[in-house]
Amino acid sequence: MITVSASRRAGSYLTFESRGHADYSEEGTDIVCAAVSALVINAVNSLETFTKDHFTAADEDGLVKIRFEKEQSPEGKLLMDSLLLGLTEISRSYGKKYLTVKIREVQ
């Protein structure tokens, strides 16, 4: 299962993490893993290309982490909102057995 978690404060994202593999089907044909990977990688690339937001990103097999160092720009917030919308819709379509999304508001 893929577990996605994000934390935000006052609408600005602090962290994002995607961990695991969906195990929807065999490696190389797993459409849930492919969809999640495409959305996450595109979001990181878009944050780097289209914003001046300060963040660090780590990418290992089955793990992507993003940590924002400062409050995000409106564009950065929109990109993260879009990423989490897409991931939530995948979870709704294919089930929490393969993908769970948790967004946590912190003080």
Image (tube, rainbow, N blue to C red):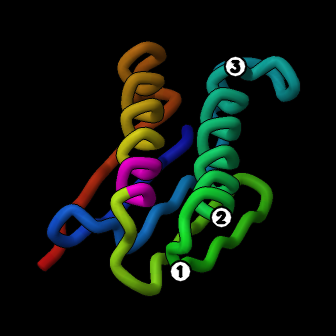
Q: Which residue was labeled with disc 2?
A: 48
Viewer-side residue, 28 vs 86: 86
Residue at the farthest bottom position: 69
**Which residue type does callout 1 highlight?**
His
Of discs 3 and 1, which sits in the foreground? 1
On the rendered structure, is 100 left or right of 28? left
Q: Residues within 10 Å of mark 3 (few under 14, many from 20)?
A: some
Q: Where does the magenta region start and end?
A: 75-80
Q: Position of residue 16 (x, y in %)?
A: 46, 62
Q: Residues within 10 Å of mark 1 (few under 14, many from 20)?
A: some
Viewer-side residue, 10 vs 61: 10
On the rendered structure, is 62 left or right of 65? right
Viewer-side residue, 52 vs 36: 52
Q: Which residue was labeled with disc 3?
A: 31
Residue at the farthest top position: 93
Q: Residue at x 42, y 26 (%)?
A: 91
Number of numbered markers: 3
Q: Which residue was labeled with disc 1?
A: 54
**Which residue type does callout 3 highlight?**
Ile
Of discs 3 and 2, which sits in the foreground? 2
Cα distance, mark 3 to mark 2? 26 Å
